[in-house]
Amino acid sequence: MASVTVYGTPLSPAVSRVLACLFEKDVDFKLAPVDMAKGQHKSPDFLKLQPFGQVPAFQDELTTVFESRAICKYICNKYPEKGNQTLMGGRDGGLLAQTSVDQWLEAEGQSFNPPSSALVFQLAFAPMFGFKQDPAAIEQNEAKLANVLDVYDRRLGESKFLAGDDFTLADLAHLPNGHILVSKNEDLFMSRKNVGRWWVEISARPAWKKVVEMQNAPLG
Amino acid sequence: MAAVKIYGKPISTCTARVLLCLEEVGAEYQLVSINMPSGEHKGPAHLARNPFGQIPALEDGDLVLFESRAISKYVLRKYKESGTDLLKEGNLAESAMVEVWLEAESQQYNPAISPIVYQSLIVPKMYGGTPDQAIIDSSLEKLKKVLEVYEARLSKSKYLAGNFFSLADLSHFPFTRYLMITPYASVFESYPHVKAWWEDITSRPAFKKVSAGMLGS
């Protein structure tokens, strides 16, 4: 019986980040839809769960958590024995392994996320919702993202995954925006040998494939 | 324990975040200056520490780290015997709240406040340029929306993660410290609980010490 509820739509990158983590950890959950078209995310009831009025929100018998990266860490801390046990840095844990995950998760949040989110908006969501695309924004953010991916390419030439030898939350955090960007312009990732190798590997993981299935499922 | 090395500058917001943690736990550290105007942060020696060419970086024996929030966590975990517990990792619900509000700082507060500080302080003082008022104005609107959420939170809770001071509160210090020496400091006047929280956290000895190394002290 799932005591875990995730609020949001699997099409939201931040929600899908949490879903990927839940599938990696084999944690049962219920997905409660939030009708953003009708403004449900700004309703008083929802704001009690997520005061910034954004998805996802996460609730279990102990607490309510928001911010997708914080939710992922909470899931890993709450269920250390379930599913994938290296998401926070190595089977035997250890401060150094955990710190490496923190470092690359911060790199995702601070360096990869801003330009990739801007591009996801321009290339995927703007056309979907009838907003006009901004060619200057696309160009600027592609250039910023290219610089970040150059750093990743050097790192992934020395290390199998971002934080080390194991797939961790640091890699997982990139799946949502990466998936959309690769579908729009695979060159960005695939023209870089090590980034390409890494992308093929992380996006082939069964947990991520389950999230994509949820995203592609017919509405209703 | 041997002193850790921090590569950065005391006036840098992200360096200040790390220095605050070191001061809070009473750790010995050595601050090694990186000469930004000469481009030292983009040279090979520093890129080996921080591949994004940014400050700060930490060196502790063979360990090299970048990203100030990750370095902060490392410092707080390493020196947890000091008695200063700003992460609450022994308590699942409390540590969750520390992570939530640290992410809120990262993803909500920082993107709203940093353009205001950059345009109104860094651009004129460091680059002799003219602030872009349009960017400042739109960032102020975003910041007000964030501060509304913080006001509601801090009306129910003494600190962001709960009734305990944590890394989540600390992480807000550097950019807020700089906002306070711009004309836009007055935005906090409309949020009395946020203002009281700010006055409380800035009364901490660690904050006074790190603040003295920053601009406008």
Image: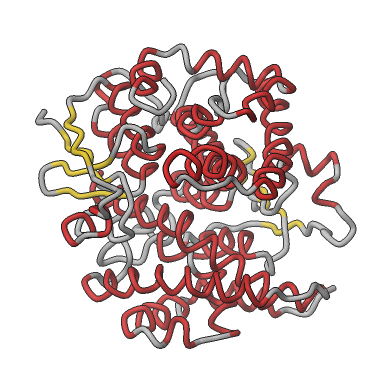
Residue A10 image position (x, y, % from top left) = 68, 67
Q: Horizontally, is B23 left or right of B148 in the view?
A: left
Q: Quadrant of the N terminus of chain B?
A: top left
Q: Place residue A211 in its image quadrant.
A: bottom right
Horizontal and vertical percent for residue A180?
Answer: 59, 77
Left or right of residue B36, residue B185 in this image: right
Residue A38 placement (x, y as % from top left): 90, 58
Percent across and percent down for residue B173 are 48, 29
Q: How many marks?
A: 0
Please state, as top left, top right, bottom left or bottom right, where the C terminus of chain B lies in the image: top left
Which residue shows up at 50% across the image and 41% down it?
B124
For the residue pair B126 and A44, the one nearer the viewer reads as: B126
Residue drawn at point x = 44 percent, y = 45 percent: A77
Quarter residue A184 falls in: bottom right
Left or right of B143 on screen, residue B130: left
- A82 or B158, which is in the foreground? B158
Is A176 located above or below residue A64 in the figure?
below
**Above or below for A44 versus A179:** above
Tell me which colouring the rendered structure shows: secondary structure
Q: Report the residue at 36% width, 20% height from top.
A: B212
Question: Horizontally, is B158 left or right of A163 in the view?
Answer: right
